[in-house]
Image: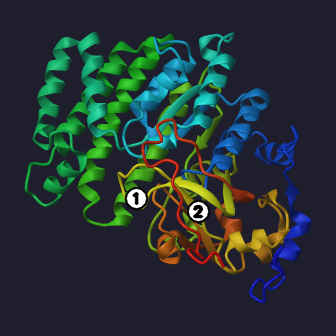
Amino acid sequence: MNPPSHLDGGVAARLRGHLVPLRGAANDYDPLLALIGDAHFALIGEASHGTHEFYAERIRITQRLIAEKRFGAIAVEADWPDAWRVNRYVRGATDDVDANAALSGFKRFPAWMWRNTEVRDFVEWLRDYNRSRPGHDQVGFYGIDLYSLFGSIQAVLAYLARVDPEEARRAKARYACFDHAREDSQAYGYGASYGLTPSCEDEAVQQLRAMNSLVARFAPVAGMERDEAFFAQQNARLVRNAEEYYRTMFRGRVSSWNLRDSHMVETLVALRRHLTDANVPPRIAVWAHNSHLGDAAATEMGEMGEWNVGQLMRERMGQDAVLIGFSTHRGSVTATSDWDEPPQRKRVRDGLPDSWEDIFHRTGEARFLLPLRGNAALRDLVDAKQRLQRAIGVIYRPETERQSHYFMTRLGGQFDAMIHIDETRALEPLDPGESWPSWEPPETYPSAL
């Protein structure tokens, strides 16, 4: 292990007494479940979209939340229609023959976020768990993202064609406004943002209102019929929000980011309302990137005007929302160098000096949980000073790592608990493509010194 640097000021040494080592035992996460307590929302992050251990440990935690604390839903950073197909599979309401087929709706880049071996195995576990339970007691799987503009339009039309053909005709006429974009969401946003093509904002709002009225009129009371009505209603809400998002994304990062995370929270609130049974609200595990689930108010992104799911949920729910982050120091990750490229297995460089990743590495503990909420003894270590924290999304560019992947955070304000795994490995995609596996050369290539 590297000796402590002059930069860390002994922070790593002082943290050691607060760490809970993770040894792979069944009771590893007892302190975390105690911290979650009776909270209705457990927001469980990831420091990249392509790390095996983040997915595997998040699944371990979620399985315990389901089995021991009766969590009834998993809401993930994924498209609503594609996740709904998985939801139908885990609840035994589909013709999909296995989890691989149920996940096949995830075709949009980056498909490996959900079409990977860890999620596949968890989906099968969830189906088995639900098999002997009545519908109201089954655990669902839901998407909270808003990229599926055209997929959601088709889902609304398909539902209306089944329940109200006349309303389907009116909806098709409204949504025809989007036809000129040829199912290219960014092309629609660019044209509408700069006045090159008509905006469809009014039509999207009108259809959402019509769908809300229809659902209220039908008011199905139970079972999959009620769920399918909610599915269609949420698709109409998504179309309305995605239309605004794609128009806004060409104006600035902050405004489009805020719209996206506001939609995620709006979806969580709608899901909570839908799943409330006999005035008993559901308990929901939320899976998304650290950058969505850690409180933005404690980061430099918040200082730039961004908010996120973690911040908004804390403001709404207080301690009824528990925020959990992940980090790693080194290893490998599934990612690309540019958008829409095939996945690669890329080497993750050591955490930058004096970053949280570096501090955690210097504790000498390979895997640990660090409880933060209510730990007064840690306050001067995790709140007094902002430090760099790494965030790898679906793109990883180590050659510009400081600019591309690090931002400043106050850890104690950002998360209620942090899980660090010092060395991690790349997630295994179900559809790796011709470029898999491929590795970046080591920093010492070609001399190996």
Above or below: residue 181 compared with residue 9:
above
Q: Is residue 26 above or below residue 333?
A: above
**Residue 241, x across and y down, in percent:** 32, 44
Density class for disc 1 (Cα within 10 Å; few <14, some 14-19, many ≥20) is some
Q: What residue type is labelled 1?
A: Trp
Query: In the orientation shown, which residue stands out farthest toward the right?
Result: 17
What residue do we see at 82% from left, 70% from top?
378
* Disc 2 to disc 1, C-alpha distance: 28 Å
Q: Name the residue under label 2.
A: 347
Which of the image's four quarters has the C terminus? bottom right
Locate the N terminus and report the quarter of the image it occupies: bottom right
Task: Judge whether residue 103 can be spotted in this image.
Answer: yes
Depth check, mark 2 against mark 1: the one in front is 2
Name the residue beneath numbered marker 1. 257
Q: Residue 393 carries which label?
A: none
Q: In this view, does 110 lie to the left or right of 156?
A: right
> Is the residue 418 above or below the residue 120 in the image?
below
Residue type at numbered disc 2: Arg
Rendered residue at 82%/82% (across/down):
4
Q: Tell me, yes or no, whether the two marked residues, 2 and 1, touch with CB atoms within 8 Å.
A: no
**Residue 230 % position (x, y):** 42, 24
Q: Which residue lies furthest to the front in this view?
A: 447
Q: Which of marks 2 and 1 is nearer the N terminus?
A: 1
Give the color scheme: rainbow, by chain, secondary structure or one colour: rainbow
Could you tell whether 64 is left or right of 345 in the image? right
Instruction: Classify residue 426 as left or right of residue 162.
Output: right
Q: State the image quarter where residue 339 is shown.
A: bottom left
Q: Nearer the viewer, residue 423 or 142?
A: 423
